[in-house]
Amino acid sequence: MQKNKKATIIIISIILVYGLLAEFLLSVKINTIYLYILNPIIWIGLAIFLKNALGKSYEIQKLKKEIISYSFIAVLAYIITYLISGIFITFGNNPYSRTIIGIIVNLWTFATVIIAKEYIRYKLINNVYEKDKNKIAVLISIVYILIELGLRRIFTTQLTGLFVMETIAQTLLPLIAKNILYSYTAINSNYLPAIIYELGTNLYLWLSPILPNAPWIMVAIIDSVIPMILFLYIRYEKNKNDIFRTKEKIINSDPRNIIPLVICIILAIWFALGIFPIKPVAIATGSMEKELHVGDVAIIKKCNANDIEEGDIIEYQMEGYTVIHRVTKKTQKNGRYTFITKGDSNNTEDIEPVTQEQVIGKVIFKIRYVGYPAVWIHNLQTEEKLTVETGN
């Protein structure tokens, strides 16, 4: 078959319709049959059909080896980043089955679909002439993102501000980053780099005996940043081999220029999540005025109970929330510490004494006014929780 833009768009439209239909099939009684049998067969069947119907596609051999090498390095970077994050937080058991049968089921159910989808992307993008490749790449990326997002889940879920924010950060941004990468490699190489990265990162999640109990925002950062860095490296290699690119443009596209900034951003977010021995906490109430005001950020140093003295401001855990108050009295009985606490602007001491197991850390200094965004998010979460509980 000759390159045909209309036929390509029709096939992409069929994929979109199938993705919407799949949302319905997953919600009915045949969802198990669909997930484990029908879905892999349909994707594999479409890939085989396009292989025979569209014929051989021209591959750019010049950068093929470099792009594949970078893809393997990116997978390794992904795994190492996850493992490093686990050092600072905690590890948990892998929810995926790691029995022989479980591994085979995962490979058939998910790995075959990954391979088929990326091969289909590559064939469709290269079934049009050069001037239309970017448009088709954008179109199929949008379709794949819509399928992965799950339109039915979005339209049937109460669209609260927190849900939208988490969906964008945890799901949408990583999907956009990966689809930009995969479509770019499909244009400039073939389907192998996308399969290597997607399958490699998933194999780690499927086969590793333990996984970090990483907060969702950390997962979102790792899943978004690493594909984009890989994309920038591939683009840089392409620019170096482009005789029409000026030296200045090549230097400006060097991803090594932004990696230090990316690392600083990741470290800053990890700091905000409390992964390191010190962490920031935004003050959401006025119980500690005039020492700590609403919107201030208190820097908490993790410590043991024996490091705390009367007069220190501590953060301690209550059921479902934490409190930052000043220690007015410290007692020890049978080797165990107990603290009486009070908010500086409160008239009375807190009713319940604080045990040493509740202590998180103590305030070592404060930063004025920079915590207002976090306070706003906290208030948004509280309002949404109250709305759900009252049914309004």
Image (cartoon, rainbow, N blue to C red):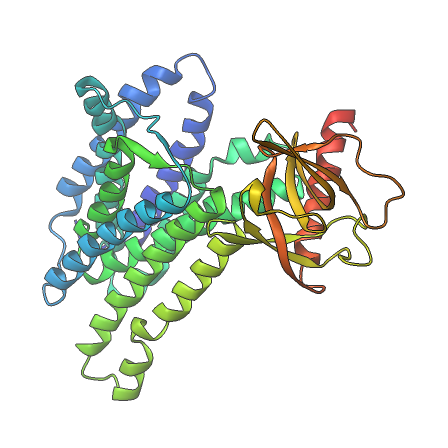
Question: Which residue lies at the image location 24% right of the left edge and 76% below the top edge?
Answer: 239
Up-down: is 205 above or below 346?
Answer: above
Res. 159 in view: no
* 361 sits to left or right of 146: right
Q: Quadrant of residue 371?
A: bottom right
Q: Quadrant of the C terminus?
A: top right
The percent coordinates of residue 313 (x first, y second) are 69, 50
Res. 243 in view: yes
Q: Nearer the viewer, residue 339 or 179?
A: 339
Q: Nearer the viewer, residue 30 or 83?
A: 83
Up-down: is 108 above or below 199?
Answer: above
Furthest residue toward bottom: 247
Question: Which residue lies at the image location 48% right of the left edge and 42% below the top edge?
Answer: 216
Furthest residue toward right: 347
The image shows a total of numbered marks equal to: 0
Q: Nearer the viewer, residue 358 or 9?
A: 358
The percent coordinates of residue 297 (x first, y second) are 66, 58
Furthest residue toward top: 29
Q: Nearer the viewer, residue 224 or 263?
A: 263
Q: Quadrant of residue 32?
A: top left
Question: Which residue lies at the image location 14% right of the left edge and 66% below the top edge?
Answer: 63
The percent coordinates of residue 253 (x first, y second) are 31, 76
Question: Which residue lies at the image location 58% right of the left edge and 41% below the top edge?
Answer: 305
* 339 sits to left or right of 199: right
The percent coordinates of residue 56 (x first, y second) are 11, 51
